Structure formats: C-alpha cells, structure tokens
Image (spheres, rainbow, N blue to C red):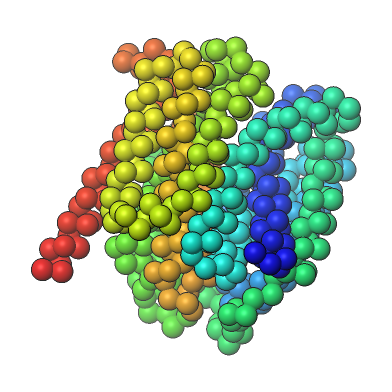
Amino acid sequence: MNLKSLGIIVALILIMFMSAIETSIVSLAMPTIKENLNVSTSISLIFAVYFMAIVIANPIVGEMLDRTKIIYITLFGLMLFMLGSLFSGLSGTFTMLVISRFIQGLGAGVMMALSQIVPKLAFEIPLRYKIMGIVGSVWGISSIIGPVLGGGILEIATWHWLFFVNIPIAILAMILVIFTFHFEHEQTTTTKKLDVKGLSLFYICVFGLIFAVMNKSHLYFNVIAIIVVIVLGIMLFKYEQKQRTPFIPVEEFNKTIVLIFFTDFAYAIILMGYNLYMPIYLQENIGLSPLQSGFVIFPISIAWLMLNFSLDKIEAKLSQKVLYISSFASLMLCGSLVLIGTHSPLFIAFSLLLAGVSFGTVYTKDSVITQEETSPKNMKRMMSLYTLTKSLGNSIGATIMGYIYAMNFVFTTLHIHNVIITSLFILLILVVLWFSVNRSKMKHSH
C-alpha cells in the first residue's frame, strides 16, 4: 500500500470518527449543558437538529459531485463541521448551540455521503471491502471512545471542549484531503440543469416521513403525513421518469437496488436498537457504568471489522442470496441468544459477535452492490441516496425503537426484549423478501 492510499484511509477514518462520535460524546454532557444554558425546552433538540441536518445534506452531495471535484466538496464539508464545532463550543445561549449543531450536522452529512463514494474511486475489490470495513466499524468504536474521551474532558474542562476537540482533528483531515483526494477516473459535468422541482418534492417526502414517525401529538396528523408522503412519492416518481437529468435517477432502481436500499434501511433501524438501547438496559437494569456498557457492545465493532478482511473469500464460496440469508440468520441467532441470557453482560457480549458479523456483511455488500450495479454517470447520486437511506434508518430507528423500548407488553419481562423481538420480526420480513425476489428472478429467467 502506497503513502497516498494510506493518507486516504486515515482521512476517511478521521471524517467518520468526527461524524460518529458527536452523539456519544455530547450525550454525557446533557445535564451540564441544560443547567449551564438554563434550557427550559427539550434538551434533545441538540441531537434532533444534528440528525435533521445530516438528512438534508446527504442527498445533495451527488448533485454537487456532478459539478465540482470531490476534494472541494470534502473540504467544504470539513469546513462546515469545523465552524459548527467552533460555534457550538463558543455558544452562550441554547439557541446559538442549536444553530451551531445544525451547521455541524450539515458538514457531517456531506462527509458521511463522501465516505461511501471515495472508496469506489480510490480502491479495487477486495481491498475496498477491507477499507469499508475499517471505516464502517468506526461507528461502533466511537461508542467506546466517546464516553471515555467525553468523561475525561468533563473531568478537566467545561462541556465547551467537547466541541473544540473536533477542530484539530478536522484540520488534520483537511491537510490529508488536500494531498490525497486526487482521483484519475473522477468526472465532473456542469452542463446538467438542476432539477429543482424533483429536489423540492423529494425533501418534502423525506420530512413528511420523519414527521409521520416522530409526531407525538394527535395520531391523525401521523396518518395524514403518511398519506401525503405516498401521494407525493408517486408524483415524484412519475415526474422524474420524464426528466432528462432527474435528481432521483429512477431508471437505476431495479428490483435488486430497491431490495438493497430497503435492507439497509431495515438494518439501520435494528442497529439503533442494539447500539442505543442495549447500553441503556445494561446501565438501568444491570447497573453497569456507561463505559462498561460500551465494552459489552464493543464486540459488534470487532466482528464487523474482522469480517471485512475475509469477506471476499466468503463471497467467493456463497451466492449473493445465501450470503444475505446467512447474515440474517446470524443476527436472528444473536437476538435469540440475548433473549435467553439477558442477565449476563458477558454472555451478551459474546452473542453480539454474531451481530457484528451480520452488520459487517450486509452494510459492506449493500454499499458495494450499489456502487457496482448503478451506471457510472449516476453512481455518485445513488451513493448519496444510499447514505440518506442509512441516515433515515438511524434517525427513524432511534425514535421507533425508543417507543418500543418504553412499552409494556404481557409477553415480555424486560424492555430490551421488546427491541430484540422487533428486530427478529424485521429480519423475518427481510428473509421473506429475499426469497421472494430471488424466486421471481428465477421465474423471469425461465
């Protein structure tokens, strides 16, 4: 591996680390920030605006890449993130902090979309699998480092430094990007007209969907929102079919790509269940510290990372369908074991190795199939939309799994069981879909 490749990998790790650690590192300081800034409204707004900004930024990256080189967009994303971090740290009021977090989230959204596109431009398979495994596992590793780093900073300094710590990391990433993000096969065209109507309809659909899931007032608002999203979605699809340069390249959405996007969305929801609510259960019911609970879910990241170093060899022996069904079975087995041994943190930790294998396989394969199956002219747009699918799954999953975790059912004794059973149900739907789509493909080929 040459120096340039190493520089690209380090830059991608730093970019993903900054985007991912923001949730786990800031959550520790919530009580302090609330007291210090005299917050009377919901303190969780500092997370909501961050995720909202990511959702806004993700899909537009593909459009930007058609017009500008990847190096400039990466630097723009890093600059936004750095400015957002700086002003978050300098915030003297809650309003300023919320606005700063929104700017920071826009930068994170740009960087997250690029982290799916850069490996395709820079590396060939099987090395690409390894790189994407390393970058993907950063999400899990940040859940360990976040509490440690955050706790250490809060011991010696104020909460403002939780944001200032991003600035030197962002500067280092910018230096690496300037020297390494030069790709031979990169193409930019400025002749395409921006599809403003398609873009507007798309964003209305996205925010309608988020509202339908997150609204807690009257239920009929949620129902109306879902109906509006379905109607606008059909309008958007029909409109984009007629466009020469659509914002959503609908011709790319064959059965395989639709199934891949749905699988990724479903897996993002399940991952939120494990990553967010397993530590809450371990702290509230078992009495572990935030750091100890982080170590219990750490095997997800370890298995995720290790799997990607041998994914090319596994893939050579299995068909695509068998690979996915095996991954679903691995996560089902993990869920079943956790249901049996919920009171033993050590047993949970070992069981979660199976979850890491499943997440590592599905996320890496989803990304690579989207990169390889879409036409070169639409690849960047499709990867931006793919990243959005994951971001939507994360934000909607965090909310849905939160509702489910808090519910009381006759057939469950612990709240974490609700999350596991929901995950098993989602996996069952995926198994049925993968079998039915592959069966229809076989019928078609006959």
Nearer to us in this view, 49 or 351: 351
Q: Position of residue 386 (x, y in %)?
A: 48, 59
Is residue 202 shown above or below 408? below
- Give residue 184's quadrant in the image: bottom right
Q: Name the residue located 57 percent from the left edge and 45 percent from the top edge.
A: 137
Q: Nearer the viewer, residue 77 or 354?
A: 354
Horizontal side of residue 414 vs 166, given as left or right: left
x, y percentage for residue 350? Answer: 47, 26
Q: Residue at x 31, y 43 (%)?
A: 326
Quarter of the image for residue 40 reads top right
Viewport quadrant of the N terminus? bottom right
Residue 140 drawn at (x, y percent)? 59, 39
Q: Which image quarter: residue 38?
A: top right
Q: Of 213 and 312, which appears nearest the observer?
A: 312
What is the x, y in percent for residue 77?
71, 61
Quarter of the image that includes the C terminus? bottom left
Residue 264 in view of the camera: no
Decide if residue 266 is on the left or right side of residue 272.
left
Q: Is residue 135 left or right of residue 125?
A: right
Residue 278 showing in the rendered view: yes
Q: Nearer the viewer, residue 271 or 194?
A: 271
Q: Is residue 396 above or below residue 192?
A: above
Q: Residue at x 41, y 42 (%)?
A: 358
The residue drawn where x is 56% and y is 67% is 123
